[in-house]
Amino acid sequence: MQPSDHEDYLELILENRIESLEEDTLQLISQKCEKNIDVVLADFRLLEESGDIILGPGTAVRLTEQGQRTAECVLKKHKTLECFFTEMLGMDPDTASQQACRMEHEATDDTISRLNQYLSRPRRCRQERHRPCAQICEDLKPISSYQEKETVRVALIRGPRRLGRLNDIGVIPGEEITIQRKLANGSLVVTIKGSDVAISPEIAASVLVEPVE
């Protein structure tokens, strides 16, 4: 069993609160891990040998203290990465979760700690304990809500479909933008990296910013 599979099992037990290996639970694990049930059962025996779970009596299963610590660590990595991908990079939730699954096993504790610090700063979205970020920080407002000549910093972008266009014109998280003109139709003329760019009302509503202090 690969180390990543080992961690995936523990994470799955914790997140889904698995307490027994009944047929429906085995089907769930089999589907999530893309392994047949016989392989899952064999892997769980290896998890018991490693001291991460206790099997029995009967179909019961539970995490040991060691397994609980590992599962919590992996789940924290997953949720932090997923939060960063969805809220800061604008990925859709399914893609973000898939990418987090791949990266959580290689990400160091220091990397996750730094990401958490970044996400927890004022005006940033804060990772919730049991699910990825789903709400926009109250301090963030659309760029369209600011006035002419104000300079703001891009905090996040709502809607992954808009990322390509926005990346092309330089509207990315962390970039500073000065609003030059607000047009009657809701469009904006802004300065990004020394160039004036027109932004439609729809785009402006999806770009959430914070004031530059």
Image (cartoon, rainbow, N blue to C red):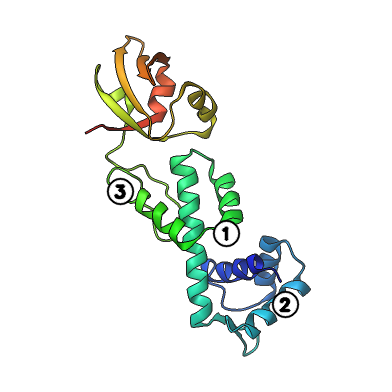
Does residue 165 sit above or below 111 in this rendering? above
Between disc 1 and disc 3, the foreground one is: 1
For this orientation, the residue located farthest to the left is 213
**Image coordinates for residue 153, horizontal then vertical, percent:** 32, 31
**Image coordinates for residue 124, horizontal then vertical, percent:** 33, 44
Which of marks 2 and 1 precedes in the sequence? 2
Could you tell me which secondary element the residue under label 3 belongs to? loop
Q: Is residue 78 left or right of residue 192?
A: right
**Image coordinates for residue 206, horizontal then vertical, percent:** 41, 29
Residue under label 2? 41
**Image coordinates for residue 149, horizontal then vertical, percent:** 24, 17
* Closer to us: 78 or 19: 78
The tag on residue 152 is none
Determine crowd level at label 1: few under 14, some 14-19, many 20+ residues with C-alpha closer than 10 A: few
Tell whether label 3 touches label 2 (CB within 8 Å).
no
Residue under label 3? 121
Residue under label 1? 106
Q: Residue at x 38, y 20 (%)?
A: 192
Tell me the amino acid under the disc marked 1.
Glu
Q: CA distance from mark 1 to mark 2?
A: 26 Å
* Closer to us: 31 or 82: 82
Does residue 163 sit above or below 139 in this rendering? above
Residue 51 in which image quadrant: bottom right
Which of marks 3 and 2 precedes in the sequence? 2
